[in-house]
Image (cartoon, grey):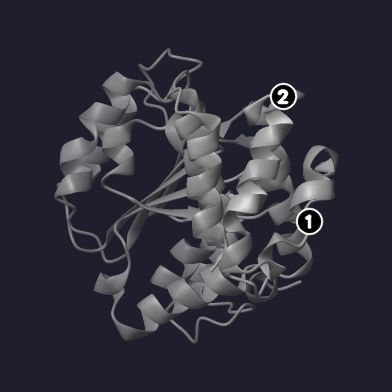
Amino acid sequence: MLLSDKYPFLTEYFTRALSTNVRALPQSILFYGNDADAQFTFATEIARLLNCTSDKSDNCECLNCRWIRENSHPAVLTISRIDNKPDDDDSKTVISIKQSQIIKEALVSASEFHRVFIFCDRDENGNIAGLNPLNFQAETANSLLKIIEEPQPGVTFIFLTRYVEDVLPTIISRSQCFFVPSFKEINYSYNCISDVFTDYFSHSRKDVFDLSQKLNDLTKEISIQEILDGIQNYILAVLKTNPNRTELIKHVELVENAKRQAKLGIKSANIFDDLCLKLIN
């Protein structure tokens, strides 16, 4: 299946940005979601489109496209705890300050290519995972802020993570964030809210507070975190079978925000009122 079929909204967004003006593309991008492989694939595709010297088709065989597919392009670098480490860097579990310094030094010189740095975690077996406070620590993230905040033309930074809040807020504030849905065979369990929340998008505005009350009533039996996880899983299950429903991507982001509100101790009734008002138009 083509990327454009899997991720029509994201593909259309980035294709439009690239076709009109490369400067319209965010120079710092953060992908989040539970499928790091999908994020990495999409990040690599962006790098390919930025460097393609031919027609940018899915099967283009120009030198740049071949290099990127082979993970050997000199200007498209994966930055992880095992990728692109200097010889004197003995850190094994983190993206290091020394790697940050290599990036800064590389950007001093000009390049004929569009340089793309993809930040993620990767283990010794090549498995991709997301950034988190353990593998992408504040000291390293902060050392990158200046080059992210004042980026050179022809440079794009892409960060991959499962949860937005797993990345330093100063990186988030300088990046445009996109949720990338998974197309793996994942069991999106939402039994805990199925009697209340199924087909929420068919409700009208007059149903908002009734739905909010029903969700809040569930907190007498299960935690608000479980309820919000169930809501998000239901939306993801619908999105998986209806990838053209781009409003659902925004709904996933709204639930992520509700989870952050819950962690701050905001009352569940207020959280559900706010969420339902935003989900139901």
Considering the image in quadrants, where does the N terminus appear? bottom right
Q: Looking at the image, tell me whether mark 2 or mark 1 is earlier in sequence order.
A: 1
Q: Position of residue 238 (x, y in %)?
A: 75, 61
Q: In which image quadrant can residue 248 be found? A: bottom right
Instruction: Tell me the residue at 28%/80% (across/down).
Output: 21
Left or right: where 37 falls relative to 157: right
Q: Amino acid at mark 1?
A: Thr
Left or right: where 68 falls relative to 136: right
Left or right: where 61 falls relative to 117: right
Q: Secondary structure at mark 1?
A: loop
Instruction: Tell me the residue at 45%/28% (across/down).
Output: 266
Please report contact status of discs 2 and 1: CB closer than 8 Å, yes or no.
no
Label number found at residue 198: 1
Query: Circle 2 is placed at which residue position?
Result: 220
Compare residues 192 and 209 and report the one nearer the observer. 209
Q: CA distance from mark 2 to mark 1?
A: 20 Å
Compare residues 214 and 188 and report the one nearer the observer. 214
Instruction: Tell me the residue at 64%/72% (across/down).
Output: 245
Q: Position of residue 66 (x, y in %)?
A: 56, 67
Label 1 packing within 10 angstroms: few (<14), some (14-19), many (20+): some
Is residue 68 positioned above or below 79 on the image?
below
Is residue 19 positioned above or below 34 on the image?
below
Instruction: Tell me the residue at 41%/25% (across/down).
Output: 136
Whether residue 87 appears in this view of the structure is yes
Is residue 280 positioned above or below 223 on the image?
below
Q: Amino acid at mark 2?
A: Lys
